[in-house]
Amino acid sequence: MAEKLISSKGQLQRLPLNIKGLDENLEGGVPRNNTILIAGAAGTMKSSVCFNAVYKEAERGGNVLYITLEQSYVSLLNHMINMGFDFNKVDVTIIGSDPAIIKKKVQQMKQSKKGHIILSDLGSLRATIKGKEAAANWWNIIFRIIKALKDDCNISTLAIDSLNALYVLTNFKDPRNQIFQMFTSFKELDLTTFLISEMPRDGSRLGYYEVEDFLSDGVIVINLVERNRKVTREISVAKMRATNANNDVFTLEFGKRGFEALYGGKMPLV
Ligand SMILES: Nc1ncnc2c1ncn2[C@@H]1O[C@H](COP(=O)(O)OP(=O)(O)O)[C@@H](O)[C@H]1O
Ligand SMILES: [Mg+2]
């Protein structure tokens, strides 16, 4: 499927990141059906920020697919429960890659009126992969699941956590070329896609192969910044196509009201 041409500004649909103070600086959110890179060093809350956006989409009744390759779904859910996400408001379904089981689960999902968070992790994928198919072909396996669910389940949003883990699992002969193909496939899916990218702490690159940022429609960067021994998280929109974005750096905080991007940030404690 090709990208759709809009006829007026109002037609562009957006998916809020559900970060107070940042969505307002993004005309309401990221353009739907775009590919958004969330880049940051370890512990910058990339997974949390991404999950926070897709959770809200499910809370609104949407169906989302979150593929966690770095941590198990149990570890991810434990973290999110600890952060206070209410899993009574959404349905969570764990899937592997067995088409017959996926079909069965899709039937069950269709009986519920709540939005769905469909989770898949390496363990559940591994357990259902038959024979030698796996090894070098993780990307094909994952892409097949995404396509099957998209058509069957009306998925609006996809998250891949993380690209780095996917790279480790994929045997690239010509990485830049294959990543280009991978991004083309993402675009053709017509989903709002969040791709998590672990970047080095010195911020020297946003994606492992240094092509991910220009191949993405939007790039959100989270940094850990130390001042007088106090470490704060800072978030900024490096790029957002079709959006009059404010590119300033905001302090990212998580509290009882969820995520907030504070303009200018708080002064660090001395
Ligand atoms: N309320 C909270 N509950 C749990 N972890 C929190 C909370 N607030 C901040 N964190 C931090 O979130 C970090 C992990 O977030 P995560 O999204 O997994 O990061 P990343 O994906 O960037 O590695 C931990 O370092 C933890 O200290
Ligand atoms: Mg993570």
Image: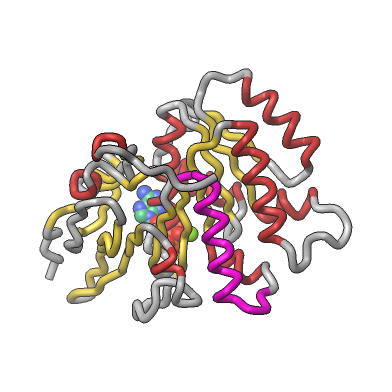
Residue drawn at the location 55% of the way across and 76% of the way down? 176
Identity of the residue drawn at 23% across and 48% down: 26
| Residue at the spot 47% in from the left edge and 31% down from the top edge | 62
Q: How is the image coloured?
A: secondary structure
Whether 82 is among the magenta residues is no
Q: Residue 110's x, y, as percent? A: 62, 22
Residue 265 visible here: yes
Residue nearest the viewer, comparing 163 with 121: 163
Query: In which quadrant of the rendered image does the N terminus lie?
Result: top right
Image side of residue 36 versus residue 255, left or right: right
Is residue 205 shown above or below 128? below
Place of residue 9 in the rendered image (x, y in percent of width and height, measured from the top left): 24, 40
Q: Quadrant of the C terminus?
A: bottom left
Residue closest to the eye, 250 or 179: 179
Q: Is residue 178 left or right of residue 41?
A: right
Observer-nearest of 30 and 57? 30
* Residue 78 in view, yes or no: no
Q: Residue at the right extreme?
A: 131
Identify the image quadrant of residue 33: top left
| Rendered view: 173 above or below 248 | below
Is most of the magenta stretch helix, strand or loop?
A: helix
Residue 69: image location, x then y, percent: 60, 58
Question: Total label count?
Answer: 0
Magenta span: 172-192
Residue 127: x and y in percent read: 79, 51
Q: Residue at x 72, y 51 (%)?
A: 125
